[in-house]
Image (cartoon, grey):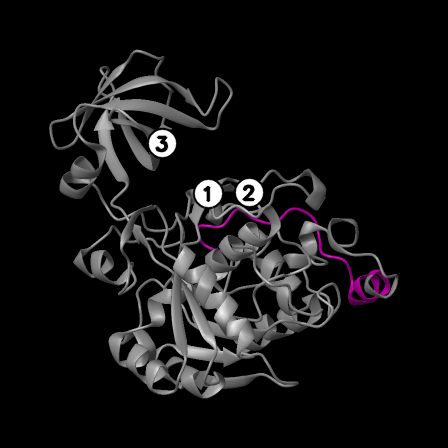
Amino acid sequence: MKPNEPEGRGANHASAPVAGVPPASGCAPSRGEAEHRAASGATGVGLFTTSDFDFSLPSELIAQHPAAERSGSRLLDGSGELPEDRVFRDLPALLRPGDLLVFNDTQVVKARLYGKKPSGGKLELLIERVLDGHEVAAHMKVSKKPPPGTVLRMAGGFTAELLGRWPDAAGPLFRLRLSDDPHALMAAHGHVPLPPYITHADTAEDASRYQTVFARNPGAVAAPTAALHFDEALLAALAARGVQRAAVTLHVGAGTFQPVKTESLAEHVMHRERYHVPEATQAAIADCRARGGRVVAVGTTSVRTLESWAASGEASGDTAIFITPGFGFQVVDALVTNFHLPRSTLMMLVSAFAGHARVMALYRHAVAARYRFFSYGDAMWLVRAVQTDAG
């Protein structure tokens, strides 16, 4: 089923260093430069540069632990002319009976594994994808990469034979064959793959809280973080208000944390992630449209999934969709999202959705109001801008 199509910049400055985030290169354009470019009518990769999505963030605002209660996080309502500070459990008041919340039901796996080379040198694997025949595609962190054929001794007593690069000889990941079922080995010996800006080693709290309450399809190495704020009480309150629920699956990859390293957006190469839009969700979206409800994506991963389906007509596959200002959204009407890293593709996505000037102003408000940022941080409520290339 193909989705029905709905109808239809204040400048920033060079960022201060952010813990766990590479420093920005160069300076953002001035407010006048950004406004001039926006007024010119150009859109997307031709109008904006990576510096336009930079912002200054004090390191103490990067959340290192989750809020005491999932739905007790703060929620910045960015739907009106002025930002409004709320609590996440206020979300039902922002939704209407007949709206449809679309969640990403991926499950974070304990994808970080430690081991040693035959020489004794330490290494770390981050399994990005489980392949056939006990094989995996993984990132490898090691002082000197071993050659293909090397058998690595992993903590927990199993082995990993390095077979080469993936998905091809020049691929960014490594292909390895584990000595047993990868999912079983990760469950028994793996560690929660916390983001690079979280500085503590994973704990039992992380195993519980870096996972949504409705996770069901294993395969992600990063959580769909906007969904971390939902608990059973909030889900019950949404149901009582007449808000419907549906699920998609996108297995979030480690590339989600990577800043864009090219100043030109056109030169950036997106990472690929697997997605699936079930038939039941396709039907739920059609029903939502028929009754005049809004499709509300919970998190940028749900946006990427729904808009990939809309653009390709394929309900399952790999997506490398790159959403920048000027993008024509076909499915999503409103968005619940966390605060994202400067210069990241997710900053570009939310700017495309709600307008660059609006998003940058909301981020300035969030910093001034001491919101908590990134995966364990607070959230924001956005509605789609009528013109996605302007503020």
**Residues marked 3 and 2 touching at CB (< 8 Å):** no
Looking at the rendered structure, the kind of residue marked 1 is Glu
Which residue is at a point 51% across and 67% down the rendered structure image? 286
Residue, disc 2:
320
Residue, disc 3:
138
Residue 52, position as x, y percentages in the image: 69, 57
Question: Does 314 sit left or right of 354 as displayed?
Answer: left
Task: Give the quarter of the figure containing the C terminus.
Answer: bottom right
Q: Residue furthest left?
A: 157
**Residues marked 2 and 1 touching at CB (< 8 Å):** yes
Which residue is at a point 71% across and 53% down the rendered structure image? 27
> Can residue 337 be seen in this snapshot?
no
Q: Is residue 92 above or below residue 282?
A: below
Q: Residues within 10 Å of mark 3 (few under 14, many from 20)?
A: many
Residue 192 forms part of the magenta stretch: no
Residue 273 tag number? 1
- Total tally of numbered discs in the picture: 3
Q: Pick the residue in front: 22 or 359.
A: 359
Residue 322, position as x, y percentages in the image: 61, 48
Question: Does 36 sit left or right of 127 as displayed?
Answer: right
Residues drawn in magenta:
16-37
Give whichever of discs 3 and 2 has the lower sequence position: 3
- Image-quadrant location for residue 54: bottom right
Q: Main secondary structure of the magenta part?
A: loop
Q: Is residue 348 above or below residue 148?
A: below
Residue 329, position as x, y percentages in the image: 64, 61
Question: CA–CA distance between discs 3 and 1?
Answer: 14 Å
Q: Which element carries disc 2, helix, strand or loop?
A: loop
Q: Is residue 292 above or below residue 248?
A: below
Q: Pick the residue in front: 324 or 27.
A: 324
